[in-house]
Image (cartoon, rainbow, N blue to C red):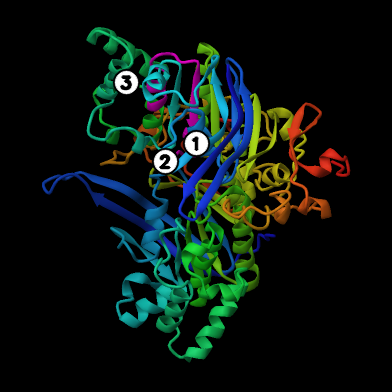
Amino acid sequence: MTDDSPRPQLLRADHLTRHFKIGGALSRRTLHAVDDVSFAIGEREIVALAGESGSGKSTIARMLARVYKPTSGEVFFEGKPLSSMTSRQGRLRYSALVPMVFQDPFSSINPVFRVQHGVLRCLKLHRPSLSAAQRLEEAARVFEVVGLNPNMLQRFPYELSGGQRQRVGFAQALAMRPKLILADEPVSMLDVSIRIGLLNLMAKLRDEEGVSILYITHDIASARYVADRLIVMYAGQIAETGPIEDVLTHPRHPYTQLLLSAVPDPRAPLSVAAETDRGEPPRVIDPTPGCRFRWRCPLAIDTCAQVTPELAELRPAHEAACHVAQTSSEEVKAFT
Amino acid sequence: MLEVSGLTVDYILDQGNVRAVDDVSFTVGRGEFLGIVGESGCGKSTLLFAAAQLLAPPATVAAGTVTFDGTNLVGLTDDQLCAMRWRDMSVVMQSAMNALNPVTSIGAQFKDAMRAHGKFTSEEIAARSAEVLKMVGIDPVHLRSYPHQLSGGMRQRSMIAMAMLFTPDLIIMDEPTSALDVVAQRSLMVQIKELQLEFGFAVIFVTHDMSLISHFSDRLMVMYAGQVAEIGATKKIFDRPLHPYTQGLLEAFPSIRGPRVPLKGIPGNPPDLSRVPAGCRFRPRCPYAIEKCAVIAPDLYPHDGTLVRCLRREDGSLAS
């Protein structure tokens, strides 16, 4: 399923930061939704971005989709900075190469048109060289790729189930011949029995169509099922990142350990550590230096309250931002 | 304590009746934790609403009884039900954001519930409200907070605190954790279980996430297309699921441990309840279906202490 050979880089985020002003017009308080986040996505790679709600996952996706402008930092796509893409043509080309698939398949498709409308419009806008007949042909092709019968193009969204609608979302993205699909919780609204089918589709898009996917999720088990690499976010920063199997078998950041201990798994005995955690993720408003997990962390030391930990490589290609993990030679378990 | 027997709920629509819950029977003993799982549209929420007599038109109970502490709730008047609600049984809804009133404080809503169901002085109300909030791990200062000032987990916890105001015998929970993150989810589940062990109330817990309740429920009921597919001890069902649908559900979960294996999920979609297929309702999606499954509508058959709605279990032709 995965191999560890490095893939050519497709997109790189460099010290990406996004702050939001909150409160009234005179308020000077800022919410640090994403703070100094750097990562890269390779070709033909599924990267899972995991974390609690409010951890900044969706803000990152929106910056990559150019919905938000970063407060500071830069995104490079195929080596070119996004901020230099100012022409309409350049922006259209980018949104065709990096489309988004949304969480809610019930509100992300226009209910008054047949489902072919969205697919054909994407084709018309982003691949203007195609004739009308070719557009229909191409729409039928992408429907087949995502596992839908091409005669469903004529259906209305209300005639489709949630799983089928989400496949339409992927078909629309695929019609633009993308390099990277930003999938924001694409399966969380779907029933358990249907989720696997969509995860399998994501793996198929990577393996057969060569598309990279940024898979945003709070479900670590599903991330493990499809993703090659994992980025764990906490309070707007990256807590830990690395090859997914390595992060899951050797989690070094206490937050990753907490997250893993909370995953319900009928095949595993009940872990008790999570009982002691009644914490909540902080809303990061005008933060002071220091680790943002320290209030919930049983391992916190004095340094954690003074110095913001930086990501450091603790195992091959596997980085964690934790003072305790970085200073101790063996693996420390905060939660099991 | 609670006995639901032959409960059938119809939605009466212009296009014809839709039977959302079809002949469902189960019991809940004192202090028991019953989990109900199923996909969306399988009738699990309708069943809960029927059990709590909260159904509103177009839904009506077409047949069956709901006996709670010896009283049949079906057909009771609103006044009679009102006397039991909160005191003897309470319901925790799916979305705490919508279930709490956004324009009054948590404390005021606790006061409303207590005033409506008993005579209490302001001091008694304040003391009891603070007490139940503490039980669920929230600082009583939040009695003055409004719902938007609390996090999702705290809102859901204060709903549970409210449900416990009168220490009822039964708390019905409709997916209380579905809007929460895994960490908050786990800590809420552990808390519900602790409170249950301490106060001895029974819980009916509805969820679509089977893995969530594996460690918490005593018995498990799996619903499919308005019917009970399988009901039995949780551990037995997880160790050896008998219904092909239950097997499929269990195999649809990727695990974070063990080898990475490709999973298939369950092909197809649940049937439209206004047009249920003849024979077994799961047949179109079932990998083990044989000819007679298309003809005979299966009953619930006992099998090693579990009840399972599968013809091939009944005749023993399906090996585990």
Q: Which chain does the numbered disc 1 sit on? A: B
List the residue tagged with mark 1: B175
Residue A9: % across, % down: 52, 68
Badge 2: chain ID = B
The residue positioned 70% from the left and 53% from the top of the image is B278
Where in the figure is residue B57, as x and y percent of width and height? 42, 41
Neighbourhood count class around disc 1 (C-alpha, 10 Å): few under 14, some 14–19, many 20 upward? some
**Mark 3 belongs to which subunit?**
B
- The lab-note entry on whether marks 3 and 2 share a chain reads yes
Q: Which numbered dot is residue B57?
A: 2
Instruction: Give the magenta-colored segment's residue range.
Output: B159-184
Give me the residue at 44% from left, 74% from top: A118
3D distance between C-alphas at marks 3 and 2: 25 Å
Of callouts 1 and 2, the N-terminal one: 2
Answer yes or no: is residue A59 visible. yes
- Which of discs 1 and 2 lies nearer the camera? The answer is 2
Quadrant showing the C terminus of chain A: top right
Provide the secondary structure element on which disc 2 rests: loop
Q: On the image, numbered disc 3 is attached to which residue? A: B113
Q: Can residue A326 be seen in this view?
A: no
Q: Distance between the residues labelled 1 and 3?
A: 22 Å
Instruction: State left or right for residue B220 relative to residue B13.
Output: right
* Residue A52, placed above or below residue A272: below
Task: Answer few, some or many: residues within 10 Å of disc 3's Cα (few below 14, many 20 plus, some between 14 and 19).
Answer: some
A222 up-or-down from B101: above or below: below
Front label number (3 vs 2): 2
Q: Which amino acid does label 2 sit on?
A: Pro
Q: In this view, does A241 lie to the left or right of A225?
A: left
* Residue A77 covered by magenta stretch: no
Q: Residue B162 carries which label?
A: none
Nearer-N-terminus badge (3/2): 2
